[in-house]
Image (tube, helix red, strand yellow):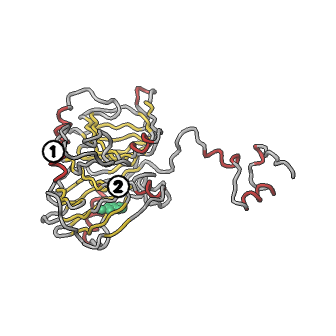
Amino acid sequence: MNALTIPKPEANSGEDAFHRRIHQNHMFGLWEIASQMTPHPQPQMLPWLWDWKTTESLVRESGTAVPVGEERRAMQLFNPGLSGAWATTNTLIAAVQVLLPGEVARSHRHTPAALRFILEGSGAYTAVEGERVMMEPGDLILTPSWTWHDHGNETNETVVWMDGLDVPLVKALNTMFFNMNPKQQPPLTEPINGSQRLYGHGRLSPTWIKGTTLHSPLLLYAWSQTLEALDALRDREASPFEGVALEYTHPVTGGPVLPTIGCQVQLIRKGEALQARRVTGTSIFCVVQGTGHSVISGKSFAWTRGDILALPSWALHEHACTGPQDAILFCMTDRPVIKALGFWREEAYADNGGHQKVSEEFQPGKG
Ligand code: 1HN
């Protein structure tokens, strides 16, 4: 038998008889694909912004254009860099969902973990495993992996929220399971906001409940408490990259709220221009209040309330508040996965006083 000839680097065109044979046999030489071992992440996803002005009008229209049937009335934000994949970043999907007065989104469960960040409307609810979790603007509500959940709006105002899920990650891992509950709304078995009563008191947790769950047992992070925490720190020196940034934590372990999705809220004070850095993993920001911009890889994204911004892995980014009021950003990220697997890296941008040169302005809807 002849020894394999080691191909020379210039023999990587894949056109000769040997390469044709390996391709026919479902093989490629590493020398043909080694350029995929990039020296640093080179994401396919694009940094992108969905402006609230556009999203809001489409979401309002969806209220009359499509019913809440078997499926939710949730507008999925597709990243234009990801070739039509169901993904806002390579690991996360964001959606904007509307529930009109009197509507119910029926009970189902799935392996992707989900969260809601409430944008508009008071008094609607998500029922999670038999517990109604009441919604107020700015609240963070969790529906962990494989928990039954339905939504209902018994108020007379429309409710709008941002959904966040780890769908692209679950799909990449081939671990998608989904089913409908035979009941539109299974019976309530827990007190309203029961998880908040048990776990919503900071460092005080019930002693009689042994062990804990991978996900946070606290399903509601109320905006009133979030705002109070940010206010208490407003006059402090904080992160040069994130401003007054607080992580929503699992009350028992101190870890992230979901094993696959971490959440943060950040206050960027009036006039504050944070410094640039890059980190591994992706994030999706939602502007809660204020106006400002984020510079991502030299492109400036101007933002205002309700805008949703997707940040790729390892992209240089910096945020600034430019309006007359403090800015607040909500952020969801795949950082828990990145950290658990040992892929976390961060790098401050040292040049130019920590600020990028802006070479382009993002145009909403165009790029
Ligand atoms: C889902 O179950 C909801 O429960 C919202 O409201 C958005 C996006 C992808 C997959 C499942 C919901 C979703 C979703």
Whether residue 280 is visible to the viewer of this picture, yes or no, is: yes
Residue 356 horizontal/vertical position (percent): 43, 34
Residue 346: image quadrant is top left
- Which residue lies under the disc numbered 1? 224
Residue 294: image quadrant is top left
Mark 2 neighbour class, 10 Å CA radius: few under 14, some 14 to 19, many 20 or more: many
Using residue 103 as the reference point, say whether residue 349 is left or right of it: right
* Quadrant of the picture in which ligand 1 is shown: bottom left
Indicate whether 256 appears above or below 55. Answer: above
Residue 114: image quadrant is bottom left
Seen at 28% across and 43% down, the residue is 250
Seen at 69% across and 59% down, the residue is 26
Labelled disc at residue 113:
2
Verify CB contact (< 8 Å) between mark 2 and mark 1: no
Mark 1 neighbour class, 10 Å CA radius: few under 14, some 14 to 19, many 20 or more: few
Callout 1 amino acid: Ser
Labelled disc at residue 190:
none
Cβ of disc 1 within 8 Å of ligand 1?
no
Using residue 245 as the reference point, say whether residue 92 is left or right of it: right
Q: Nearer the viewer, residue 52 or 131?
A: 131
Quick one: which residue is furthest to the left in this view?
A: 156
Disc 1 element: helix
Residue 78 horizontal/vertical position (percent): 41, 58
Cβ of disc 2 within 8 Å of ligand 1?
no
Q: Nearer the viewer, residue 251 or 99?
A: 251
Disc 2 element: loop
First of labels 2, 1 by sequence position: 2
Indicate whether 105 appears above or below 237. Answer: below
Callout 2 amino acid: Ala
Q: For marks 2 and 1, give the CA distance.
A: 24 Å
